[in-house]
Amino acid sequence: MICSLAPLVRKVSEARVVEMTEKLCDKLLNGKDQHRDIASIALKTIVAEVSTQSLAQSILHSLSPQLIKGITGSMGTEIKCECLDILCDVLHKFGNLMASDHELLLSSLLSQLGSNQASVRKKTVACIASLSSSLSDDLLAKATIEVVTNLKSKVAKSEMTRTNIQMIGALSRAVGYRFGSHLGDTVPVLINYCINASENDEELREYSLQALESFLLRCPRDISLYCDEILRLTLEYLSYDPNFTDNMEEDTDDEGHEEEEDDESANEYTDDEDVSWKVRRAAAKCLAALIVSRPEMLSKLYDEACPKLIDRFKEREENVKMDVFNTFIELLRQTGNVTKGQIDANETSPRWLLKQEVSKIVKSINRQLREKSIKTKVGAFSVLKELVVVLPDCLADHIGSLIPGIEKALNDKSSTSNLKIEALVFTRLVLSSHSPDVFHPYIKALSAPVLSAVGERYYKVTAEALRVCGELVRVVRPSIEGSGFDFRPYVHPIYNAIMSRLINQDQDQEVKECAISCIGLIVSTFGDHLNEELPACLPVLVDRMGNEITRLTAVKAFAVIAASPLRVDLSCVLEHVIAELTAFLRKANRALRQATLGTLNSLIVAYGDKIGSSAYEVIIVELSGLISDSDLHMTALALELCCTLMSDKRSSPSVGLAVRNKVLPQALTLIKSSLLQGQALLALQNFFAALVYSANTSFDSLLESLLASAKPSPQSGGIAKQALHSIAQCVAVLCLAAGDQKCSSTVKMLTDILKDDSSSNSAKQHLALLCLGEIGRRKDLGAHAHIENIVIESFQSPFEEIKSAASYALGNIAVGNLPKYLPFILDQIDNQQKKQYLLLHSLKEVIVRQSVDKAEFQESSVEKILNLLFNHCESEEEGVRNVVAECLGKIALIEPAKLVPALKVRTTSPAAFIRATVVIAVKYSIVERPEKIDEIIYPEISSFLMLIKDNDRHVRRAAVLALSTFAHNKPNLIKGLLPDLLPLLYDQTIVKQELIRTVDLGPFKHIVDDGLELRKAAFECVDTLLDSCLDQVNPSSFIVPYLKSGLDDHYDVKMPCHLILSKLADKCPSAVLAVLDSLVDPLQKTINFKPKQDAVKQEVDRNEDMIRSALRAIASLNRISGGDCSVKFKNLMNEISKSQTLWEKYYSIRNE
């Protein structure tokens, strides 16, 4: 009957379902015993199948009173339990539809917490937890107060106390951050119970620690006051073992003790009655929650928790030992998270503190690796693995002591695949992260078990062993010159082991790929000792190139072989390989084409003399099809290969001809692209230079084609500004490659274009100026008389782009000959008021180039430049102030001792524009590479960044931007200031009403928000801080209220907020989970927002971007485990899955 009930509920009318429900309730409460189970299952089925809200309400109307009656009446325990079970399901699914019954339900359920039956109490706890997620704050407070009052009562029995503690844990798990306001009442009570519980009441301690763990994860903001106390408590109970005195000698670490230690673990004390292990397990999990949720406590955790955890590796209960390992791994992970990219010189930094503990960790772990238990050994390798990931070179002094543990794990008959895989992964990580010579004494001991693992039957072990062999090859012979270590005895054993795997066809793809990669490494490293074997081995690799599944790996293996300094003899397969690779350039698979280009390049560099021109021509034809702006990375690789082909001295004239006919037209199309930049642009410049060098391509025709490509075409109109810059750079490289005579004639031709007043062709003049700048930067143009005056004439042009090109040209020409042209520019700035902005841009070009090239200015020039710049600090025009700031910042890189004090003095200037300009100048002086300004500015940083509380919004924004740059490029310089800066930064994210003004435009009013840019900059700054200074940012105090209000702000602010939310979901999931409910509303509003009917296309597109950005954040939230405890978030996900347009967007984003 019950099987057919589910489809029935979906088919019959509402009235019928209600009637069925009423009858089943009657059976449940008043029927015979044997009918009760069936009625209960049937009711649960109905609840599960109800899908419409109206039906749910009709059913609840009759079901709720009956269930309450069953729970509170004088029924038997069984009926109560069944009713509680059904009610739990009902509340979980429809809790928010029952708001009118909440109070009655709550009081009914609370009364059952005092039941004498343990099963009733247990089910009541689950029921109240289900109810609590939809309760109002007042009722939640009522429930909490009652439970806490019960806890404080002196006369309660211990089992009642336990139930109430479980109830508090369950509540906090169900309602998350909403429980935060009640921590003040509950935490002290729980800590008190933990300490004062009677000796045999272990469960009370366990439940208290579990509740505290839940608080740490769910209410990270409100628990911060108690963290130190909780830390002390967990450390005390981590070793709580009242029935066992640990008299094991601490330092039995030498091999002689191996046997007796094994015996000891066999006849260790066991007692079925002893449940103190539950307390230790709860303490370990609670400590893990503390580590995960409080990155800012790391240094303290290293002082207090780390030694204790290492000591507890000797835990006697295996399940608890795993939890201790996991807690320690969380500590290591958090250290890695927080200190990414930092140096560990500082003695309070977590990495430095971890380094001090390494020898203790290794000693303790080695003891675990000698245990009998497989599970223990797997756990121990997991700890070592994480340690190497976080501190890559920390085990250099301990390799010798770890080798026996690895050997034993790989050789022991009892070892499982899982243990072998962990041991191999650890070995691979250690080999790849330490310098080769530390392993040389142990190669013999290490290689035998690894090579035997290559022959294992289980494919995952084999694949991992092959990866280890790859690292082993590198370690055995780190350089071809020889390292004093005799590697020859290992060449053939390694080769034979891998070869037997490579030849074998019937095995897993992963094994095939690993064997191919490994043989590539072997041939490139030991090729000179494998002369006899190569004719057998290389054809197998070629064969693997012909197989679709393994071809990519084989192509990469040949790249490794080609790059080897040994010049391995490939004559037996070279022709075949080149033909295969050329054919791969036509394939659709992008990764394959990319790898093929790299491999061809390496092969032609190394073996060009054996390949021949006819093969080159075929390659060139294929290459021409890969050059386009739709894939710039591929284009760069293709052009690099082209240059390699042309620069090969042995290539015949026909190769140059093929390039000219096939590749040059593509290159001239590419150069017009506005997307061209970076590596592809550099490759294109080298391509033109190589074309001039390669015979039979005339400079003049090339130059002409380049200049012609800048002409506006009737179809596509003018050419993009970015394209003109690309053309100019290529022209400059071309001229320099062609020699002085050609270069001079080109410069003369370009200046003639500028002199020709009648030329109304602005594009031509624009390009001429850019070309002069690019040539002037690379070569002194002092020989061309009055070139500076000819360029400055263009400042009068009516076209903006020509003015800016002229200022760019003037600055770059000055770079080529500073003594001649710099005084000219400075003199002009003083005398030409109208041209100041353009001349300052020219000066900026000069200063930026000098700061990059680490060049010096003459003393007199610096004085003159500084006076000039400081005079313009206060300019009314924002453009001028920005240029001045950039110039000051870049000069500060060249002359820090002079500039830092000069900038600092001006932070207290009464003029807001001056204060803002000097802070922006500091921003420009903080670059990624180390500079001498770093130690000079370090003590002065706060006087610049504390302007974040200035009363002028421009200055505040400048300080926020500077803080962002510090956080991105030099986080170590600002770490100490963050406790003071963060509250001020967070304050900048709030909407300030005093910065919002209404402008009356006659027919309508327009609202202007002057604080918008500042808020956007502040959130972007937090985003950067999350990457570099996670341990300083306390995420839970930032998410609510600041991030929450940002998610509801203007479009420009929401975008960075979505990014921050995604990052937090990834890095601090517990802090996000704790407030997940409150973040749902703003996200829901964003994804459901519809632009007005008459919105322009731009507004519609922006809204689309916004929805995608919000969905990206939602996808990150959905990846957090435990997110399903938030009913609101669950409903949001349901809503997305029901809307086809939203679901399609969400699905594509999730799979990005």
Image (tube, rainbow, N blue to C red):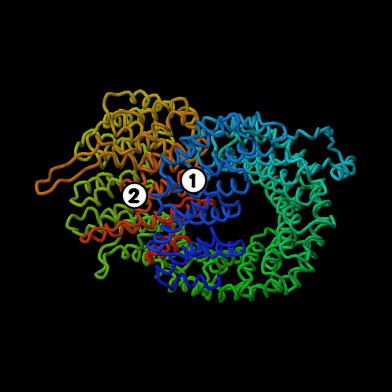
Q: Amino acid at mark 2?
A: Gly
Q: Amino acid at mark 1?
A: Ser
Of the image marks 2 and 1, the number of the one nearer the N terminus: 1
Q: Is residue 327 above or below residue 77?
A: above
User: Closer to the camera, 55 or 790?
Assistant: 55
- Which quadrant is home to the N terminus? bottom right
Residue 829 figure quarter? top left
Q: Secondary structure at mark 1?
A: helix
Dot 2 corresponds to which residue? 773
Query: How many residues crowd mark 1 within 10 Å: few (<14), some (14–19), many (20+)?
Result: some
Residues tagged 2 and 1 counted as in contact (Cβ below 8 A): no
Residue 937 figure quarter? top left
Residue shown at the point (39%, 35%) measured from the top left: 986
Q: Secondary structure at mark 2?
A: helix
488 left or right of 539 in image: right
Q: Is residue 493 above or below residue 70?
A: below
Dot 1 corresponds to which residue? 108
Residue 395 place in picture, x, y as percent: 72, 41
524 left or right of 255 in image: left
29 left or right of 800 in image: right
- Mark 2 to mark 1: distance in Å? 84 Å
Residue shown at the point (63%, 46%) measured from the top left: 118
User: Closer to the camera, 40 or 884?
Assistant: 40
Q: In this view of the protein, can residue 853 be seen by the observer? A: no
User: Closer to the camera, 305 or 101?
Assistant: 101
Residue 261 place in picture, x, y as percent: 86, 41
Residue 668 place in picture, x, y as percent: 38, 66
